[in-house]
Amino acid sequence: MEKLFYCLTFDSTHYAIKIEKRMKDAELKGVIIPTPREVSASCGLSLKFLEEDKPGIIGLLEEADRERVTLYLIDRRESTYQAEKLEW
Amino acid sequence: MSVEIDARGLACPKPVILTKKEIDKGTKDIVTIVDNEIAKENVTKLISKMSFDFDVEVCEGDFFIHFTTGSEMGLEEQGALKPEIEDLVIYVASERMGVGNDELGDALMKGYFYTLTERTPYPKAILFVNGGVKMTVATSPVLDHLRALEEKGVEILSCGTCLDYYNMKDQLAVGGVTNMYTILDTMNGAKKLAKV
């Protein structure tokens, strides 16, 4: 299980599914997960991915997505889990 | 000599972090002192998670949590205390989670299996029948999650009749093939059964 990963949260489930589709079409690796508990925001579905896929996945987002999508770094290396909100 | 961590008055998650730091230092006997129930719960949860024994002494509203790291418990005993696998069978009868919208059902299914990989104890077996067998073949959207579960010792079983019906017998990519006798025995013999 990855202890350090990125997570995109969305303002709606429709939007999460839409971005996942874009990601699949671009053959990028990321998985749909329930929004981690450390992040108390937005809709129930999120997109999880690792550092190597970050540029590709962020590249799929458009300027218009800025208000609808939030990027987090989830850190579970310590017993207390942390989520850091990042700019993208 | 035990090391005392006075975490009274500190906000969550400070007491846990301080305790963890002391454990990581390799200190053997530790006493963490906290002044509220939530902090006590969080610290003892950490200690339990690491399979150490502890005692809590309540004194004038403060909690004194005594524990010893690297306890003498054998690996087997630890396994018995915290079973990784529970007597639960999950029965997957379709390729989606719930009825209503297919696109949403697909997304929920992915979320479901991902969450299963994250949560312990794991189920002892997952049975796939009818459209559910689409989850165990090469084109499955949850193949990685099922492989991770199989690695943890979860038995992944697909209905052979169903694979045959969908012409996917040669595409099975995780777990084994089973028949109605085993499906029935596995379901009826389980303490708990969950249907997806």
Image (cartoon, rainbow, N blue to C red):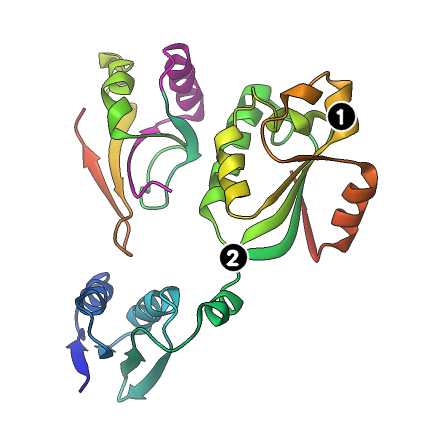
Q: Which quadrant, please, contains the N terminus of chain B?
A: bottom left
**Is residue A76 among the parts visible in the rendering?**
yes
Task: Establish if A59 lies above or below A40.
Answer: above
User: Of label 2 and label 1, which has the lower sequence position?
Assistant: 2
Which residue is the extreme one toward the bottom? Answer: B59
Residue B127 in picture, x, y percent from top left: 68, 39
Label 1: element kind: helix
- C-alpha gap between disc 2 and disc 1: 30 Å
Residue carrying label 1:
B162
Q: Measuring 40% from the left and 32% from the top, which residue is drawn there?
A: A43
Q: Measuring 36% from the left and 73% from the top, which residue is drawn there?
A: B52
Residue B104 in picture, x, y percent from top left: 54, 24
Task: Establish if B154 lies above or below A57.
Answer: below
Q: Measuring 35% from the left and 17% from the top, which residue is drawn there?
A: A28
Label 2: element kind: loop
**Is residue B116 among the parts visible in the rendering?**
no
Residue B85 in picture, x, y percent from top left: 56, 55
Which corner quadrant of the image does residue A1 belong to?
Answer: top left
> In this picture, which residue range is highlighted in magenta?
A1-28
Residue carrying label 2:
B84
